[in-house]
Amino acid sequence: MKKTEFLTPGGAADRFCDWLARRLPELDIHLKFATSKAVPGGLDVKICGVEEVLRRYHWNAKFTDRHGKTIVSHDWESTRQSLHELGNWLRAGVDAGDETTAATAAFAILEWGGVSSAKPFIQRKRDEGRLCAYLSGLAPLFSLDGEVDTDQLTAENVERFDSGMTKIHAIFDTTGSPIYDSRVGAALAMLFAIFRHETESPQRPVKDGLLFPSGEARGNQVRNPRGLGLGLPAAPQFYTRAVPRHTWARWQVQTGWIIQSVLQRNPQLFPSLESLDDRDPLAARCHAFEASLFMIGYDLRCLAREIDPDARAAVHATAPPVGLIEPVAGAPAVRPGRMRNSVPTVHPFKTVIVQYLGYRESEQGIASNDAFRQWLTNHPNRENVAIAENFTSYRYPLGEREFDLHNRSLEQVRLVAGGGEEGLRVANGGDLEFVASDEREKVCLVCARLTGCVYGSFDDGASGAEQLIACGAAGSTAAANNLMSVGRAVGTHFGLLDEQFKPTQLFDRFFGDDFCAGCFD
């Protein structure tokens, strides 16, 4: 689809842009962030209008620049300076055809973004000598200038798309192409739901394809309008059949068209922002708009009152209270709801990893789920038959959001399968420090972390299961036991847990000195 088709006069996107241009300056917004490393002290403020959101932008981030200096950002002005430096660095590497420089810049973008799942893909592209060609080849398709056709973003040429790659493609671009992560998608899905509530029957099926996809948060935030309990439609979810990777990429472009169009219709939105390098100031305004969506999308409860003036209290009541809850006897006090979405798909971790290594050592060619499953069928033994029969569940640790083994070299797979400190370093993208992202990924390692905290505080699994339920990490005893089963296997494999499943010194170094407080606060 081309921009002129997407924004056909009178169509849903065109009407939505008109509505946004009018309503964004007067939105009733309640930004409420829990305290975290990214937002120390949290945030709780009621404001009016999207420009006020940008003034409240706060997200602590850092990266190591090309000179080895640590660059820190927190508000929007320092953040846009970071993005400017990162973009120039990445473009310089790609323009020069320097695979090492391009990859290092891409890693810095992931460091700034607090996500690491795309690292194996970037490493593989670099090692193959194809990273620069891959980024430069897709760049014209993410540009907001000219008549780009999103149909040219396909399953064949978009080899990977996730919360890391959207940052890399957006920062590489110079026209204002937005970072489209779960927050931005959630904010747009919610705004579109409000638009429909005000202008048409919200019960009617959505036409013209304006179903903005989103994804799960790691904590107790709502990033799907349906989760508000107000009868709103669900947003299609990342990492499902409803949103294949090329569809996610297309939404980055289509969102850019919407943002551009809104800003052109309302020149008073972010009017004073200028480019840092004499480019069209519209691109700077686009990123300011995107940053505001990022803040709104942290938790959609911030816009609940726009649907129903009386809804806010009811919606907030569905979330756990902010204060401390009484711990299970002998346990440290915990804060509820912060570790939601921590239950993995249960699987025999060690068995799967060992059999996967056997597959990679005996097979050549492109690694994939289909190829691994066929190998299991062709090499029957007790373990292989069990994995093949339960493949949907047992493939869990191989996935992009976990250890991404299909993108790793055979030597890296051997190291991961070998476990210990070096295996952990490779599995964690080359780092021996765990950084929890804002989205649901690295769940296997989160399980090891929670399990270590449980066994560090309790002598029996039953009390630990109660504590995991109390803190919101699991919803039932069965789910808590599944979490600990995976956590024990992953933790002992990488040396994070000892034979009694208690934290080791490596656990302390990897997760931080305040590991129990970090899990449960």
Image (cartoon, rainbow, N blue to C red):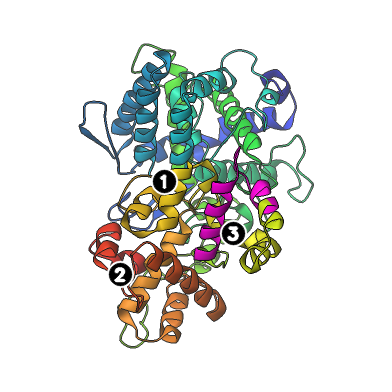
**Tag 1's secondary structure?**
strand
Place of residue 273 in the rendered image (x, y in percent of width and height, measured from the top left):
38, 22
Residue type pointed to by label 2: Cys
Neighbour class for label 3 at 10 Å: few (<14), some, many (≥20)?
Answer: many
- Residue at (49%, 39%) from the top-left corner? 293
Q: Position of residue 335 (x, y in %)?
A: 37, 70
Please report the residue visible at 44 percent of the width from the left and 30 percent of the height from the top.
127
Query: What's the residue type where badge 1 is placed?
Result: Ile
Which range of residues does the magenta coloring cover? 350-374
Residue count near mark 2 (Cα–Cα under 10 Å), binned few <14, some 14–19, many ≥20? many
140 over 196 or under it: above or below: above
Residue type of the residue flagged with mark 3:
Leu
The residue identified by callout 2 is 516
> x, y percentage for residue 437?
41, 50
Instruction: Describe the element under mark 2 as helix, strand or loop.
Output: helix
**Quadrant assignment, res 210:** top right
Crowd band around label 1 with a 10 angstrom C-alpha radius: few (<14), some (14–19), many (20+): some
Instruction: Name the residue beneath numbered marker 3.
Output: 228
Q: Is residue 368 magenta?
A: yes
Residue 38 in picture, x, y percent from top left: 32, 49
- Residue at mark 1: 47
Q: Residue at x 55, y 47 (%)?
A: 360
Q: CA distance from mark 2 to mark 3?
A: 30 Å
Q: Look at discs 2 and 3 and give the one toward the viewer.
A: 2
Query: Which mark is on residue 265?
Result: none
Q: Measure how far apart labels 2 and 1 are at the Cα level.
A: 35 Å
- Residue 366 visible to the viewer: yes
- CB of mark 1 within 8 Å of CB of mark 3? no
Task: Choose mark 2 or mark 1, whichever is in front.
Answer: 2
